[in-house]
Image: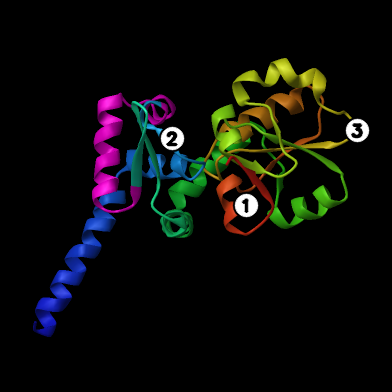
């Protein structure tokens, strides 16, 4: 094989990977699967896609070897093909944030509107968790919490948070986290809790980033 033909074949294969993720719905699916393995039905519910449409996007990601699947009874369970898939997705997200001012503007506008004024870094949270200074709340759906969560976090899903307000301590900062920096669930919860008089903040990143940094998590078997 000549060098030019070799390079053409390599770049064609790389283009298969980049084409697979060059779709907003598939980017959302990768973010969702970074929380843990899921069925196509759950993915469809969380993304607002039809089951058939979600299935097509998953097949594209599977053909590009970015996700894998296995049968459990009558359900197909999908998961990321490996940690590098999330690493690549994170790198693409950071590239967009650094090069596309519109992304940052949209995030700032949303958080200003929802009064999410205070963010907590991973480094700060590690220190404050060790000192037992904060109450850490995972606001993702319970299915995702059960698949894996930050060690010591309590599951208070966003859609159930009003039911749990009476169980939140008043003498600690409430730190909420969700799927990652582009996820709005933690912003919604922080905004609500601040209106209720709690000193609430959101973690700047999410569960997948925490796990990727090798920090303590609890995962299902």
Q: Quadrant of the C terminus?
A: top right
Q: Residue at x 60, y 45 (%)?
A: 207
- Asked if residue 155 is among those painted magenta in the image, a careful observer would answer no
Q: Residue furthest bottom?
A: 2
**Which residue is disc 2 drawn over?**
38
Residue 141 in sight from this viewpoint: no
Residue 86, position in %: x, y?
45, 54
Residue 91 lies, with reference to residue 160, above or below; the image says below
Q: Quadrant of residue 143?
A: top right
Mark nearer the viewer, 2 or 3 = 2
Q: Quadrant of the N terminus?
A: bottom left
Callout 3: 10 Å neighbours few (<14), some, many (20+)?
A: few
Label annotation for residue 171: 3
Callout 1: 10 Å neighbours few (<14), some, many (20+)?
A: some
**Which residue is disc 1 drawn over?**
210
At mark 3, the secondary structure is: loop
Q: Residue at x 81, y 18 (%)?
A: 166
Residue 193 lies, with reference to residue 33, above or below; the image says above
Distance from Cα at disc 2 to Cα at disc 3: 37 Å
* Magenta-drawn segment: 42-67
Residue 72, position in %: x, y?
39, 32
Residues 39 and 95: in front is 39
Distance from Cα at disc 1 to Cα at disc 2: 20 Å
Q: Residue furthest right?
A: 171
Q: Are marks 1 and 2 in contact (CB under 8 Å)?
A: no
The answer to whether residue 84 is left or right of residue 60 is right
- Asked if residue 64 is among those painted magenta in the image, a careful observer would answer yes
Figure disc tally: 3
The answer to whether residue 3 is left or right of residue 149 is left
Residue 82, position in %: x, y?
43, 55
Q: Earlier in the sequence, mark 1 or mark 3?
A: 3
The chief SS type of the magenta part is helix
């Amino acid at each position: 094989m000549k060098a030019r033909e070799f390079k053409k074949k390599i770049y064609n294969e790389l283009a298969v990977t980049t084409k697979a993720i060059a779709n907003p719905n598939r980017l959302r699916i990768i973010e969702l699967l970074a929380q843990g393995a899921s069925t196509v039905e759950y993915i469809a519910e969380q993304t607002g896609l039809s089951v058939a449409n979600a299935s097509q996007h998953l097949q594209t990601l599977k053909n590009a070897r970015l996700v894998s699947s296995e049968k459990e009874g009558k359900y197909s369970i999908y998961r990321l093909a490996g940690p590098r898939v999330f690493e690549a997705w994170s790198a693409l997200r950071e590239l967009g944030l650094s090069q596309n001012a519109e992304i940052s503007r949209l995030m700032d506008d949303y958080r200003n509107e929802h009064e999410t004024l205070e963010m907590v870094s991973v480094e700060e949270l590690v220190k404050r968790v060790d000192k037992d200074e904060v109450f850490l709340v995972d606001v993702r759906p319970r299915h995702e919490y059960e698949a894996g969560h930050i060690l010591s976090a309590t599951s208070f899903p966003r859609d159930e948070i009003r039911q749990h307000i009476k169980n939140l301590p008043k003498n600690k900062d409430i730190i909420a986290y969700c799927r990652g920096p582009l996820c709005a669930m933690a912003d919604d919860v922080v905004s609500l809790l601040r209106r209720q008089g709690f000193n609430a903040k959101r973690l700047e990143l999410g569960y997948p980033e925490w796990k990727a940094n090798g920090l303590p998590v609890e995962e299902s078997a």
